[in-house]
Image (cartoon, grey):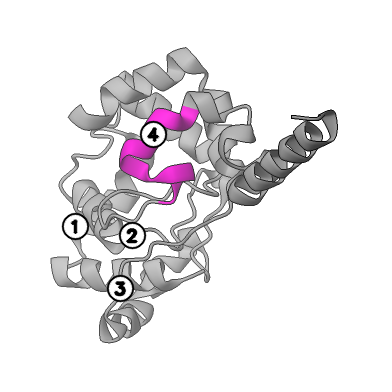
């Protein structure tokens, strides 16, 4: 093989890799990728979860993912599935992992939504606007996360955990949220989850 052919093959390979993974901000070319790779088993490649009960990590604000990892690892946010993985992420470098997912293009959940549930959820969402904002984007300054585009099953499950005081039990900063959740019927939680999942 001549030098010019080797050069051509090398350039073609690089172009293919860049086309597949979108440059330095995504996939294996990102320095955070090796540390975040194991998360893809559940959360999908680059955090683009396709499952109804598994959150989308792609485009998640790094401050929130970092807090979630720390809470899971410490047991503050109980989860038998996540505790060991979170401890591993802390060992690998939570800033690198959170930064990697924050740099990925947000891929809203592909789970199909019932349009009637979305509309009922829109009407019921007035009680959530005070904290999460009119568009569901939250408020990082107050530690309130973005709900938009997350899978409806995941969102509903989190509401039910708050309602039963099984998410961050005993956390006084969440007392008013949990009181609100107790007043929301389970079917309305499904509608709210559908609505916030539909937002982009």
Specify start and end residues of the magenta stretch as a single range. Answer: 36-48
User: Looking at the image, do the residues carrying marks 1 and 4 touch, with CB atoms under 8 Å apart?
Assistant: no
Secondary structure state at the residue bearing disc 4: helix
Name the residue beneath numbered marker 3: 112
User: Looking at the image, do the residues carrying marks 3 and 4 touch, with CB atoms under 8 Å apart?
Assistant: no
Name the residue beneath numbered marker 2: 151
Q: Locate residue 136 relative to residue 5 in the image: left or right.
A: left
Numbered tag placed on residue 182 in the rendering: 1
Q: Earlier in the sequence, mark 1 or mark 3?
A: 3
Secondary structure state at the residue bearing disc 1: helix
Q: Earlier in the sequence, mark 1 or mark 2?
A: 2
Residue 120 in the image: above or below residue 191:
below
User: Looking at the image, do the residues carrying marks 4 and 2 touch, with CB atoms under 8 Å apart?
Assistant: no
Residue 75 visible at all: no
Q: Residue furthest front?
A: 1
Name the residue beneath numbered marker 4: 39
How far apart, in angstroms, are the residues tagged by discs 1 and 3? 27 Å
């Amino acid at each position: 093989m001549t030098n010019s052919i080797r050069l051509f093959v090398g350039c073609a390979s690089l172009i293919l890799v860049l086309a597949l993974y979108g440059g330095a901000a995504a996939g294996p070319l990102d320095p955070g990728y090796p540390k975040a790779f194991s998360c893809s088993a559940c959360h999908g490649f680059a955090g683009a979860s396709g499952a109804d009960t598994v959150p989308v990590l792609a485009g998640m604000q790094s401050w929130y993912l970092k807090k979630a990892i720390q809470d899971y690892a410490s047991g503050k946010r109980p989860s038998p599935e996540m505790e060991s993985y979170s401890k591993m992420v802390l060992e690998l470098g939570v800033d690198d992992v959170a930064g990697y997912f924050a740099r990925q293009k947000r891929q809203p959940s592909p789970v199909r939504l019932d349009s009637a549930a979305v509309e009922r959820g829109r009407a019921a969402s007035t009680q959530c606007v005070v904290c999460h904002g009119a568009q569901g984007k939250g408020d990082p300054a107050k530690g309130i996360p973005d709900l938009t585009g997350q899978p409806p099953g995941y969102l509903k499950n989190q509401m039910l955990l708050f309602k039963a005081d099984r998410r961050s039990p005993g956390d006084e900063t969440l007392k008013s949220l949990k009181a609100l959740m107790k007043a929301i019927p389970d079917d309305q939680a499904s509608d709210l989850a559908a609505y916030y999942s539909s937002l982009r």
